[in-house]
Image: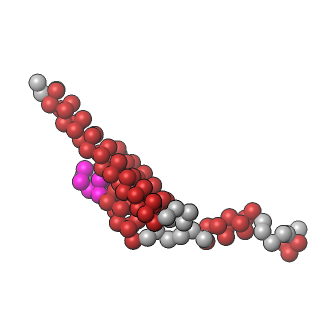
């Protein structure tokens, strides 16, 4: 098949063009992603903290790149994701401490 006869916008070209148009992660997106990844450092590793940190950092980076939202909306959503991740981590720590104390009673 002669590729010169294909229409100018094939699905492959459209996907490639769309991938090239993604906005970069702004500096505040990197900062908030790193803050999410700090969960792993503070908790000294572990699968659950790693999954929480990685998922929230990926969510922050994804939202930070969205050009269809205003900067204020993106920052607010990213702050909410970061706060929720740290809140979930704190809840898990408190749950673990509570369970440990109940076992020693």
88 in relation to 18, above or below = above
39 in relation to 7, above or below = above
Q: Is residue 21 left or right of residue 57?
A: right
Q: Quadrant of residue 41?
A: bottom left
Closer to the camera in the image, 29 or 20: 29
Q: Can you name the residue that lies furthest to the left here?
A: 105
In the rendered image, residue 35, in percent from the top left (x then y), is placed at 31, 60
Residue 46 seen in the current view: no
Q: How is the image coloured?
A: secondary structure
Closer to the camera in the image, 8 or 72: 72
In the rendered image, residue 42, in percent from the top left (x then y), is placed at 24, 54
Instruction: Look at the image and tell me in which quarter the N terminus lies.
Output: bottom right
Q: Is residue 2 left or right of residue 35?
A: right
Task: Name the residue: 52% across, 62% down.
Answer: 69
What type of secondary structure mainly makes up the magenta span?
A: helix
Task: Name the residue: 67% across, 70% down.
Answer: 17
Number of marks in picture: 0
Residue 77 seen in the current view: yes
Task: Name the residue: 32% across, 43% down.
Answer: 88
Instruction: Look at the image and tell me in which quarter the C terminus lies.
Output: top left
In the rendered image, residue 59, in percent from the top left (x then y), is placed at 45, 55
Q: Which residues are magenta?
A: 38-43
Q: Can you name the residue that lies furthest to the bottom here?
A: 4
Task: Name the residue: 88% across, 72% down.
Answer: 5
In reply to whether residue 13 is colored magenta, the answer given is no
Q: Can you name the residue that lies furthest to the top here?
A: 105
Closer to the camera in the image, 29 or 53: 29
In reply to whether residue 40 is colored magenta, the answer given is yes
Q: Quadrant of residue 18?
A: bottom right
In the rendered image, residue 68, in percent from the top left (x then y), is placed at 56, 63
């Amino acid at each position: 098949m002669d590729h010169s006869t294909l229409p100018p916008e094939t699905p492959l070209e459209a996907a490639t063009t769309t991938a090239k148009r993604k906005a970069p992660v702004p500096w505040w997106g990197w900062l908030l992603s790193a803050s999410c990844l700090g969960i792993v450092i503070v908790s000294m590793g572990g699968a659950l903290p790693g999954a929480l940190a990685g998922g929230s950092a990926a969510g922050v980076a994804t939202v930070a790149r969205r050009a269809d939202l205003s900067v204020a909306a993106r920052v607010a959503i990213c702050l909410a994701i970061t706060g929720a991740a740290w809140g979930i981590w704190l809840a898990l720590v408190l749950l673990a401490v509570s369970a440990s104390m109940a076992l020693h009673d």
